[in-house]
């Protein structure tokens, strides 16, 4: 038996021996990480540097892209080190730091999607009052509350988990998961369970109810509105809905992996599904919003044309 003072590291047992293929996996994961950084940083720069994009919807998108960089950075450098390592261990402090970053990033993502749905609701249902209802000050407050709320909730989760007495240090995952740490506890976890229910209700169900409410209202308006209004709703809501559905799939895969026995599934597929949210969401969102949102797409085209013209001029 070990208590919390004796556990100085966790062993991650989901990794398996890949031999020389580990270098191929390293290159693939590194390529994914570079793609995530480049795509999200590019769109952040486009939004920040183009004054015509300093609108509520694009500022919320900027917050989303920053969050995707934050969540990816909490995962990919660690994963790259583990791929090359022969011993898959992580110190207790770093494990809880990773839990804090990944869980807060997930909450920011969901709350940000809820805020964006509220923004679309005001834009489509109250177009004449939109500018007075969604001011720059309100946008700044909503973004600040989104991040502060996530940090506050996850600080409580991380503190309660780090206070537990542990009877083991084996985590059957490729990264640190709070549920797996709590399962190692030999002390009472009642407070953790109650806080977990409260945090889930407040951070998951409230945003989902808001999203559901706003889209019901948007659908009602679309049924009785003009063709132009319906086109506007489709063009702005399609990437948001796709992002929300993709996020939901990622959460579902993660929940199935942590709560149920997935040993019958091949190891590579199991690992991919457990990391689906961290890999696919930050890759898919920049592509969807970059292609679907006309202002971002046109700005990207102008930037590309300017780059080609500059390169051509300098080569002459």
Image: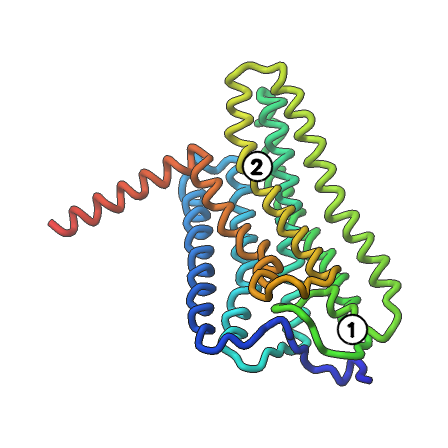
Give percent across and percent down for residue 6.
Answer: 76, 85
- Is residue 47 visible to the viewer in this orientation of the structure? yes
Q: Decide if residue 212 is on the left or right side of residue 139.
A: right
Q: Decide if residue 217 is on the left or right side of residue 56.
A: right
Q: Decide if residue 24 is on the left or right side of residue 238.
A: left
Tell me the residue that label 2 is attached to.
Answer: 136
Give the secondary structure at mark 2.
Answer: helix
Give percent across and percent down for residue 267.
Answer: 59, 66
Q: Which of the labelled discs sits on residue 184, or is there none?
A: 1
Q: Residue at x 79, y 77 (%)?
A: 166
Residue 255, located in which quarter of the rendered image?
bottom right
- Is residue 147 visible to the viewer in this orientation of the structure? no
Give the secondary structure at mark 1.
Answer: loop
Q: Count residues near mark 2 (Cα–Cα under 10 Å), then give few for <14, some for 14-19, many for 20+.
A: some
Q: Count residues near mark 1 (Cα–Cα under 10 Å), then give few for <14, some for 14-19, many for 20+.
A: some
Residue 101, located in which quarter of the rendered image?
bottom right
Q: Decide if residue 277 is on the left or right side of residue 208.
A: left
Separation (CA) of disc 2 from disc 1:
46 Å
Front residue of 224 and 136 = 224
Q: Which of the labelled discs sits on residue 238, or is there none?
A: none
Q: How many marks?
A: 2
In the image, residue 133 above or below residue 229: below
In the image, residue 32 above or below residue 91: above
Q: Earlier in the sequence, mark 2 or mark 1?
A: 2
Q: Residue at x 58, y 27 (%)?
A: 123
Single out the residue that lies furthest toward the front.
264
């Amino acid at each position: 038996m070990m208590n919390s003072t004796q556990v100085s590291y966790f062993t991650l047992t989901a990794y398996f021996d890949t031999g020389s293929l580990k270098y191929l996996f390293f290159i693939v994961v590194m390529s994914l990480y570079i793609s995530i950084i480049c795509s999200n940083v590019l769109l952040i720069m486009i939004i920040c540097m183009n004054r015509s994009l300093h609108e509520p919807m694009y500022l919320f998108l900027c917050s989303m892209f920053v969050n995707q960089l934050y969540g990816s950075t909490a995962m990919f450098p660690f994963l790259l080190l583990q791929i090359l390592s022969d011993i898959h261990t992580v110190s207790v402090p770093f494990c809880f730091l990773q839990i804090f970053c990944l869980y807060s990033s997930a909450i920011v993502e969901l709350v940000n999607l809820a805020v964006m749905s509220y923004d679309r609701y005001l834009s489509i249902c109250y177009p004449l009052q939109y500018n007075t209802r969604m001011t720059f000050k309100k946008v700044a407050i909503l973004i600040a509350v989104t991040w502060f709320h996530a940090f506050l909730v996850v600080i409580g989760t991380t503190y309660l988990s780090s206070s537990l007495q542990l009877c083991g240090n084996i985590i059957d995952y490729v990264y640190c998961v709070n549920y797996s740490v709590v399962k190692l506890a030999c002390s009472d976890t009642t407070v953790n369970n109650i806080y977990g229910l409260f945090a889930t209700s407040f951070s998951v169900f409230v945003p989902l109810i808001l999203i559901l409410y706003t889209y019901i209202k948007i659908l009602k308006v679309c049924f009785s509105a003009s063709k132009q209004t319906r086109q506007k709703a489709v063009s702005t809501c399609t990437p948001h809905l796709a992002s929300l559905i993709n996020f939901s799939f990622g959460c579902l895969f993660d929940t199935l992996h942590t709560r149920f026995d997935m040993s019958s599934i091949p190891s590579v597929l199991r690992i991919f599904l457990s990391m689906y949210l961290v890999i696919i969401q930050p890759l898919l969102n920049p592509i969807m919003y970059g292609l679907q949102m006309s202002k971002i797409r046109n700005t990207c085209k102008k930037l590309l044309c300017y780059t080609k013209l500059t390169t051509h001029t300098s080569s002459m």
